[in-house]
Every structure is written in structure tokens, then in C-alpha cells.
Amino acid sequence: MSAPHNRIFLLLTALAVTLAARASNYDETKVGTYTLPDPLVCADGTPVTNAATWYNVRRPEILELYRANIFGRSPAPGTNTTFNVWDTDTNALGGTATRKQVEINFSGTPVGPVAHLLLYTPAGKPAAPTFLCLQFGGNYTICTDPAIAIFPGWNPKTRALQMPVNPVRGQASNNWNVAATLARGYGIAFVNYCEIEPDLPGGAGLPYGVHKNFPAPGPDGWGAIGAWAWGASRALDYLATDHDVDPKRIILFGHSRLGKTALWAGAQDTRFAAVIANCSGEMGASLSRRDYGETVDDVAHHFPYWMCGNFQQFAHHWTNLPVDSHCLISLIAPRPLFLNTGSEDLWGDPHGEFLAARAATPVYQLLGQTGLTETDFPALDHPLLHDLSFNCHTGKHDVYPLDWEHFLDFADAHFSQKN
Ligand code: GCU
């Protein structure tokens, strides 16, 4: 290449780099300084000094800020949703479990959409505390039980519903510890989030999910996370009617974007007795004002359809956010919440989740619960088990068998005495 051409090439490259998204920060000394909104001061400046002011004034204020600016407003609970328990086996998984498969029809008409709930409860044990897990694949990926029905799934490449090619039963079983969960006296239920609303690039799934049954939303209308959270509440509607499940001890679990969803579902629907958000990261439990890993800009740019339209105004203007993730965490209080993170999940900013949990702790304490009083980030794989719990596992943006032991310990700490 000749010298002038070389210069033009360099100039164009520099321009392209400038126009491209800024590089993510992974340097703790460069996260910047920030001031978090105080969850215990009302919009009119009144300090929240008692539970009544929290429940009657400040909590509704924070919920409204999330609805208006972040996740959008969800429709009222679907009275049209119908449930069809089409499979019951009281001798499943070698006699250790009762299995049910339930068709959830979100419109109650042939239009659907339809999700398929898989439920295992410990054999012979009515009213078990139960995990409701939002998950990424078909139910057949959970475990090798040959009776689990295989349904078509959404293919993000073709953007079409199609039967899985060569489905492998139990291929995601490492993420779930169904046998251990049952052995410790818990039920466990699964719903594939894409059956609530397909998560297709650019929001192409919205016309096929629960959005289609409601009027087109305005700038504060629900995004896909709102849709998935709403679907989780409909699954809870079913579980609350099942005599093998204790409706007062349902623990919602989600990983990653479904960790964000679990937090938002738990914030809005207080029937979820506890929430576990695994590697929920940006717009989940990690602080947005900390410039580390994924940022508000990244979410606004790559996943605009997850959020409401009004969220876009905060791209490049994070400090204008009227809330931060500690406020979302506070909305779960006083109910138990477990934030699990991963040492290699820097994109999700584990330290930002730890600091958010610390910042939400005054709300837990106001409501007579225990939060994170530890000032130091804990040793890896050593959970800080409180009402507001935190752990950082050794490893990636994932869910490991050891995590499930921690989740079960967390559940035992809050629910097993009532078994
Ligand atoms: C992307 C996204 C994250 C999200 C994750 C996931 O990495 O940036 O915010 O948590 O996907 O859901 O897997």
C-alpha cells in the first residue's frame, strides 16, 4: 500500500474505532465514582424510618420507577390463561418423584402462546416447597426421564419453530440437580422462557409471544423481560393450585437474562417466597453506575427489546437513572434473596452485585431481616448466607452442581423448618 493510501486507511480505521462502542472496562481503578439513590428516602425527601412507610410509600415509588423507565408496565394477571395437566406419574424417576406435565395456554384459545411446565415433587410428600426454574432449552434437556415430551423450539437463526434435530435428553442436567433437590424434600418445576416469548434477535419474537395478546405497548410498555416475568407469574398461578406444591414456599430461579427476569418477577409478584438470581449482571443485580463489564449502553444497544422504550434515554446517561440495582434488590425484601455470581463472569460484574447487596441491606434491616454486613468480598465458593445472601463461585457465567448445594442450603435455612 502506498504512503497516502496508508494514511487514509489509518484515518478510516481511527474513525471506525471512535464510532464503535467504547471498550468495556475491567480495571477496578477506573470504575469511576458515583452516588447511589437512597432507597430509604422518599421522592419528597422524607426518610423511611419504619416498615409502614416502606410498604405504603417508598416501595410503590421504586416499583413505579422501574415500570415507567426500565422494564415497562405488564398487563394485569391473565385471567384467560388455562392449564391442562395432561401427564401425571406418581412413580417417576425410579419412584422418587411425582412428575406432572402441564400445558399453559396464555390466551386460553388456539392462538396461544403455549408453554410446557415440567414439575417433579418428592414422592408421597404433599405441599413441598418448590423451585420454579426459568430455563433456556426444551424440558427434555433437564434430565434423562424418557417420558418428558419434546416440543418444537424457536430457532434463533431461522426465526422459526422447529422440532429439535437429534435432541439429547438430559444435555443440560449439569445445570440442575433434580435428584438432590428431590432428596432434600423440594419440588422443582421448569419452563422454557422462549415459550412465553421467543427471544429472537432484534425483538423479532415479540409478535409470537405473550405480547401478541395485549395492545401494542407505548414507551413504558413491557419489554421481553417483563413478558418472561409475567409468564413466570402465570406458572406460579398453576403451581399455587397443585396440592403437591406449597404455594407459600415457591422459590423462583433464573440465570443470566433469566436472573434479571427472576428479580423483576419477584419484585412485582410477592407470592414468590424467595428468589435466586444467578449471574444476573447488568440490569439485574449489578450496579449500573459502576463502569465495569457490561453497561447500560450495551444493554440498550444489543437488547433494546428486553426493556421498555423509555430505557433508551439512559444510554450514555447512566447517572440519570432514577434507580440502581440495589433498588431492584430492595423490592424483594423482606423475602429471602440469593445472588450467585462467577469469578470469571467479569461481564456480569460480581463485585457490582456484592456492592448492590450491601447497598440494599438497610432495607432488609429496616424490615427486620439480615443483609450483607460483611465489608469484604467473600472467598470464592463460601456463600454469605443471610436473608439477603451472596456467593461467587469459582468459574464462569454458568450454574454448577455446587451452586445447587448452596441454593438448597439457602432454601433449608428459610423453609425447611416448616417441612
Ligand atoms: C448477554 C448479555 C447479558 C445477559 C447474557 C445472558 O451476555 O449481555 O446481559 O445476562 O447475555 O442472558 O446470557
Image (spheres, rainbow, N blue to C red):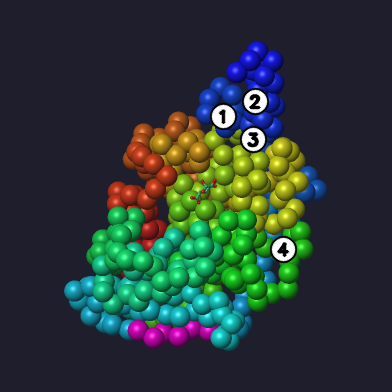
The magenta-colored residue range is 81-87
> In the rendered image, which quarter contains the N terminus?
top right
Nearest-to-viewer mark from 3 and 4: 3
In contact (CB < 8 Å): disc 2 and disc 4: no
Residue type at numbered disc 3: Ala
The label shown at residue 141 is none
Q: Is residue 109 left or right of residue 85?
A: right
- Image point 20% across, 76% down: which residue? 95
Nearest-to-viewer mark from 1 and 3: 3
Residue type at numbered disc 2: Thr
Tell how many labels.
Answer: 4
Closer to the chain start, of discs 3 and 4, is: 3
The label shown at residue 21 is 3
Residue situated furthest right in the rendering: 44
In contact (CB < 8 Å): disc 2 and disc 3: no
> In the rendered image, which quarter contains the C terminus?
bottom left
Closer to the chain start, of discs 2 and 4, is: 2
Residue marked by disc 4 = 221
Residue 296 x %, y %: 64, 42
Q: Is residue 115 left or right of residue 412?
A: right
Residue type at numbered disc 1: Asn
Residue marked by disc 2 = 13
Residue 244 x %, y %: 36, 78
Distance from Cα at disc 1 to Cα at disc 3: 12 Å
**Could you say which quadrant of the image residue 106 lies in?**
bottom right
Distance from Cα at disc 1 to Cα at disc 4: 31 Å
Disc 2 crowd, CA 10 A, few/some/many (<14, 14-19, 20+)? few
SS category of the residue bearing label 1: loop
Residue situated furthest top in the rendering: 3
Closer to the chain start, of discs 1 and 4, is: 1
Residue marked by disc 1 = 25
In contact (CB < 8 Å): disc 2 and disc 1: no
